[in-house]
Amino acid sequence: MQFEKKTRIGSPKGIFGILIKIVLLILIIFTAIILIDRINFPSPIKKIEKVIPNENFKIVK
């Protein structure tokens, strides 16, 4: 008598299982987008401005 190892215990089979996985994936991505959108990222207050002197420019012909 040989023993058989069952590797797929309780996993959905066929097209219905694939459809459930796709719907769950879309739901997780949609939830992540909603949660990231609710985070209030601070905007930069200080303007960054750097003055470059004219001496540093080289003319290439």
Image (spheres, rainbow, N blue to C red):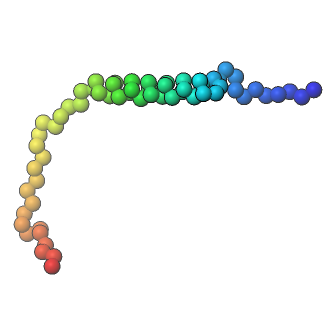
Residue that appears at 15% across and 79% down:
61
> Residue 53: x, y in percent?
7, 63
Q: Is residue 2 left or right of residue 43?
A: right
Quadrant in the picture for residue 38: top left
| Residue 12 horizontal/vertical position (percent) | 63, 23
Q: Quadrant of residue 44?
A: top left
| Count of marks, rendered view | 0
Quadrant into which the N terminus falls:
top right
Q: Nearer the viewer, residue 25 or 46?
A: 25
Residue sitting at 54 percent across and 24 percent down? 20
Residue closer to the observer: 18 or 30? 18
Q: Is residue 58 above or below residue 17?
A: below
Q: Residue furthest top?
A: 10
In percent of width and height, residue 45 lies at 12, 36
Q: Nearer the viewer, residue 9 or 42?
A: 9
43 or 51: nearer the viewer: 43
Seen at 67% across and 20% down, the residue is: 10
Q: Which residue is at the far bottom?
A: 61
**Vertically, is 9 above or below 45?**
above
Above-or-below relation of 53 to 25: below
Asked which quadrant contains residue 27, the reply is top left
